[in-house]
Image: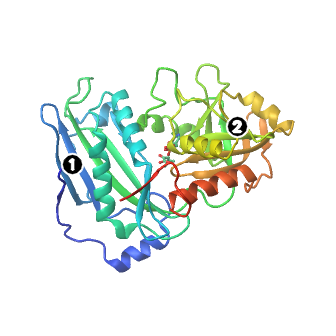
Amino acid sequence: FRFTHLPHAAPTPAARRAELLADPGFGRVFTDHMAVVRYKEGQGWHNPTIEARAPISLDPAAAVLHYAQEIFEGMKAYRAADGAVVMFRPDANARRFRESAERMAMAPVPDALFLQAVRELVRTDRDWIPEGENASLYLRPFMIASEAFLGVKPSSEYLFIVIASPVGAYFSAGAVTVWVSEDYTRAAPGGTGAAKCGGNYAASLLAQREAKAHGCDQVLFLDAAEHRWIEEMGGMNIFFVMDDSTLVTPPLGTILPGITRDTILTLARDRGLTVREDAYSIDQCYQDAAAGRLKEVFACGTAAVVTPIGRLRGRRGEIVIGSGNGADPVTETLRTALIGIQRGKAPDPHGWVQRV
Ligand code: PLP
Ligand code: COI
């Protein structure tokens, strides 16, 4: 694929960019460009461009607006210690994007095209990568069904776009409090829980609002069948650390197969910790916390990186985990190990870091 670079009529002046990069928050500031690739049945993927980031025009009958045929990814580019621009396991995002497309009956983007689109955008907007310990360039590849047709069937046309957003930390410092949702579930067996599709997030918003109303940062979902087994949070996976330093995390199936989750499993095994991908019930969790067997809980994901969870709150009351304020040893060890590799400060024995 050969991307055509269209000139930008009015790129952001350097001084304004510096101002924006000083305190970007999360997902509010965007770079100057975007990558756009179109698909049409019979024509395949065509017209790859890097162009000025701008509103896109869609027919009001476009399938995405009615039947939510949409998927996305979340990944980050960093400025490494030696000044190089790097990405963390981008091939895993390409694969998951393809798998999400298959689940939503969308045209899969070949991994090579996905990676090239992301790379060309990062290269073009490299001056937008913020400096700082928690800062990075968050990349949002996504695909929408663009055929104008109201019959319910897979679209014959798609738009694959990548936008980029300089970001700071997703959560302000310290441990977060999580709300255990007993009324709403996220995904059922046979459903779309393992796909990164917009609909999953739309369905999570009411539960997330309930979490906020109870003073919590994130919602924790239980399984749809029994409302008993812990699954994941609105936008991140979850790990439990027991008093024998064993790590427990819910098994794949109805949850998003997090790339950070997979990385943490490997980093923990590398450090001689026992890891179990096992069903863990909310009842057991409350019992283990009361008995002092549950030592640490943390969230992980691209946006969240590794974030300690200090409290679980829900209908059955509140439990305080460990010190309640984060900074507990296993979470801290894994967080430091992950960040060290991602930012090129530590050796990368698994070959996860790729230069852009
Ligand atoms: N679970 C959900 C629902 C998410 O939205 C995310 C974030 O992308 C994750 C888990 C973590 O996935 P990853 O580590 O690949 O970012
Ligand atoms: C990500 O971590 O990339 C997500 O999609 C989660 C969202 C909370 C931003």
Q: Cβ(mark 2) to ligand 1 < 8 Å?
A: no
Residue at 23%, 23% in the rendered image: 151
Residue 288 sits in which quadrant? top right
Q: Which mark is residue 57?
A: 1
From what the image shows, is residue 37 above or below residue 54?
above
Question: Distance from label 1 to label 2 (Cα)?
Answer: 51 Å
Residue 315 in view in this figure: yes
Query: In the image as oriented, which residue stretches furthest toward the bottom?
Result: 15
Task: Please give the residue where the numbered disc 2 appears in the rendered image.
Answer: 274
In front: 3, or 223? 3
Of residues 214 and 341, which is closer to you in this image? 341
The residue located at (50%, 43%) in the rendering is 259
Could you tell me the amino acid type at mark 2? Answer: Thr
Q: Which residue is the extreme one toward the front?
A: 349
Q: Position of residue 276 (x, y in %)?
A: 66, 32
Q: Position of residue 214 (x, y in %)?
A: 68, 44
Is 38 positioned to the left or the right of 141 in the image? left
The answer to which quarter of the image holds residue 183 is top right
Instruction: Answer above or below: position of 9 versus 338.
Output: below
Which comes before the other along the chain, label 1 or label 2? 1
**Residue at x 17% of width, y 61% of height:** 6
In the drawing, does residue 118 fall left or right of residue 247?
Answer: left
Q: Nearer the viewer, residue 153 or 132?
A: 132
Quarter-of-image position of residue 119: bottom left
Query: Can residue 176 be seen from the camera position used here?
Result: no
Kindly identify which numbered label has been placed on residue 150. none
